[in-house]
Amino acid sequence: MTLMIEHSIHSIPPDIIKFSIVTLFSLLIGLEQRRHHIKEEFGTLFGTDRTFTLMGILGFILYIISPQNLMPFLGGGLVMAGLLAVYYFQKMKIHQLYGVTSLVTALITYCLAPLIYTQAAWLVFLIVVSVLVLIEIKETLFEFSKKFDNNEFLTLAKFLVLAGVILPLLPDKIISDEINISAYKFWLAIVAVSGISYLSYLLKKFIFPQSGMLLTGILGGLYSSTATTIILARKSKELPVENNKLVASILLATSMMYIRVLLLAFFFNKDIAFRLAPSFTVFILVSSLLAFYFAKIRSSVNLKTSDGQVAETTDNPLELKTSLLFAALFIFFALVTGYVTKSFGSGGITVLSFVVGVTDIDPFILNLFQGKLNMETSVLVIAVLNAITSNNLLKMIYGISLGSNPIRLKLIAGFGSLIVLGLALSFFIY
């Protein structure tokens, strides 16, 4: 029975199958047009389901007549475009309507036949799905566009230049004996960190604009856990928020720091990443559990929470001065790391890892991930752990210095647990 069915299917002429697909897709696009314009006056439309289906069939007929030179198909396309142009100018003149979405959709429908005959099935399906979705989300796109400010596309252009223009042009050769890294790897580090920061910025601005405090901590931590800690600690004195939620948000930002560093490790140095993974899993679990604990317990003062008043934790992450600062720190730590390695060996790197915690740790850590240091992986892993532990100490100091009285002991308890855990893993595990 199965063989008979398969034989019957294979015996159907391919042209019939392609004609059926053209008709079906044209009908679907036409039905979407009818549904989308169902509230509009009938006289303002040139057609919907039947019209679009017939356009697709016309395109099929004119294409299959002469698929080699395409003259009938191209001629029919010119006639179709002329008729649509007449309709459009009449619509502008009579109804004062200027949209061309339906006209472009009609031309796409007319072109379905050559697409089905010449292109892969997945590409045809992708085009049809894209047309259906774009027709449907007109209002959504309109609301989304309201969120853009004057510099939004300039920011996107900056990132595309960083990642798509400058990066491929740079040579992958070691810069010098002092800076044991190539220009390509150096710029790749900038692109990687900027990409994570830019993603956090986009999520906060466009996907979760009204995010609550906990989500603010998560998204801010992707950008900079230190900056997030400073801003939220300051806001503890300004906003009537529950203190425990604020502490939880700061700890979640630190959890995201561990995730960010681990992702960078897997991107640049898988050997170090696999060695870090068990410890970072513990860090992420402990910091998340601490955050969950503080988020669930009641504050000593029952203040009304106003999640809509949560501070913005990130500015635009692709400002030129930010990139230049990162580049300067990256080169500085490349020189310092190289000097310390030659002069003091692994002991010097261990000490240096504690010192860099008072700065932006990403340039130092990325140098460890990318630099060709003649050291055992365990030494580099310990250096990463020490830098993060030192940075957690700095964030705790920022928190208790800038935050209100009710959050200070909680921050000491939260960050203190992570600092003790980091020291234990660094000195006793590795």
Image (cartoon, rainbow, N blue to C red):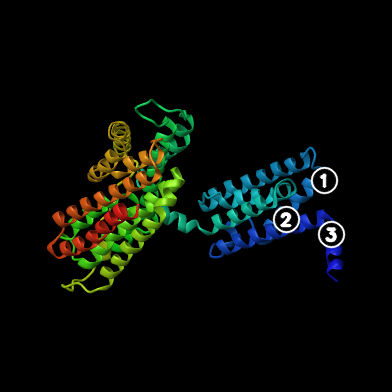
Which residue is located at x 66 percent, y 43 percent?
82
Which residue is located at x 38 percent, y 44 percent?
193
Which residue is located at x 54 percent, y 59 percent?
136
Instruction: Look at the image and tell me whether residue 418 can be seen.
Output: yes
Tell me the residue that label 2 is attached to.
Answer: 22
Calculate the distance from the C-alpha at mark 2 to the C-alpha at mark 1.
16 Å
Tell me the residue that label 1 is attached to.
Answer: 65
In the image shown, does 2 or 271 lie closer to the viewer?
271
Give the quarter of the figure containing the N terminus.
Answer: bottom right
- Amino acid type for the residue under numbered disc 3: His
Element type where label 1 sits in the image: helix
- Residue 182 percent location from the top left of the image: 42, 30
- Residue 117 percent location from the top left of the image: 75, 48
In the visual, does 220 lie left or right of 11? left
- Residue 291 percent location from the top left of the image: 29, 65
In the image shown, does 351 or 217 lie closer to the viewer?
351
Foreground mark, 3 or 1, reads 3
- Amino acid type for the residue under numbered disc 2: Val
Calculate the distance from the C-alpha at mark 2 to the C-alpha at mark 3.
19 Å
Tell me the residue that label 3 is attached to.
Answer: 10
- Identify the image quadrant of residue 16: bottom right
- Identify the image quadrant of residue 153: top left
